[in-house]
Image: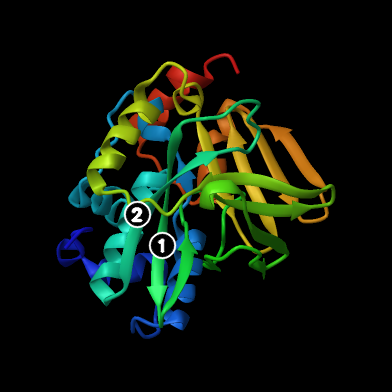
Amino acid sequence: MTWNGEELDFEAYLARLGHTGGTKPDLDTLRTLHREHVAAIPFENLEMMLGRPVPLELTALQDKMVHRRRGGYCYEQNLLFAAALERIGFEVTGLGARVRAGASSTRAVTHMLLKVEVDGELWQCDVGFGGDGLLEPIPMRAGAEARQGEWRYGLRQEDDGVLVLRTCGPEGWFDLYAYTQERRLPVDYVVMNHYTSTHPKSSFIRRPVMQKASPETRRRLVGDQLTVTRADGSTDERTVPVGELTDVLVREFGIELDADDSSELIRVHYAGA
């Protein structure tokens, strides 16, 4: 099995999501699990901030995100989700994307997403893009649009079969990332993960990043700046004092660090903030 779904502690994963429904390989199950995963497991890069490697073996992913109830970033999240879908019986293909959000030049292929086939139709799934990411799958076809909660998403096709995931705000459509349907294997994500988690130019090794998407808001904590964005473009922003950091991680993102990790994170990244 490509995603090691047979090794997944499936019942523990469903419990982490709060899932109580069925698990048939159908569209309703795919949508439900995608939505529940995004709601339950936040985007975060704290292992890198604590000076640790980011292992992608399923046992490590389960221990971190399921048993210790932490979050993760794209490879961690989507590899765990792929294992769960494979365990259920879905046909899952890994893909790679170039992130465009905020980019002034072409970036390398460093983002992971999934292609899932259901009843002969292809669906784009991605539980690991963070605050701007999909809440549910979207049909993987040019021109597809979907309203998910208060947010709008669409897929635009460019030359050479490139598909671009976009989200719509008060100022119009905004590109999130671009991808092709070239199949990527777990070993490809090991290489991408090494660059993303260690390279000096990677944005993920510079400062703590926590994100969480919901039907009404997009929450981000970047460094010590907490931002809550709504679909009408309005935002609430504030600086999080060091003394409130642990409580904010729990309250806003559901991330519970033990005392040692919390102290180390503050010592290395928030001293004097």
**Residue 135's spot in the image, x, y percent?**
56, 63
Mark 1 surroundings: few (<14), some (14-19) or many (≥20) residues within 10 A:
many
**Would you say 238 lies left or right of 186 here?**
right
Sequence-wise, which precedes: disc 2 or disc 1? Answer: 2
Where disc 2 sits, the SS reads strand
Vertical side of 52 occupied by 226: above or below: below
**Residue 22's spot in the image, x, y percent?**
36, 85
Q: Is residue 203 visible?
A: yes
Vertical side of 129 occupied by 223: above or below: above
Where disc 1 sits, the SS reads strand
Judging by the rendered image, the residue that carries numbered circle 2 is 94
Judging by the rendered image, the residue that carries numbered circle 1 is 115
Q: Residue at x 18, y 51 (%)?
A: 59
Mark 2 surroundings: few (<14), some (14-19) or many (≥20) residues within 10 A:
many
Vertical side of 12 occupied by 23: above or below: below
Q: Quadrant of residue 110?
A: top left
Q: Amino acid at mark 2?
A: Gly
Q: Coloured how?
A: rainbow
**Residue 238's spot in the image, x, y percent?**
73, 34
Q: Amino acid at mark 1?
A: Lys
* Residue closest to the eye, 208 or 135: 135
* Residue closest to the eye, 132 or 125: 125
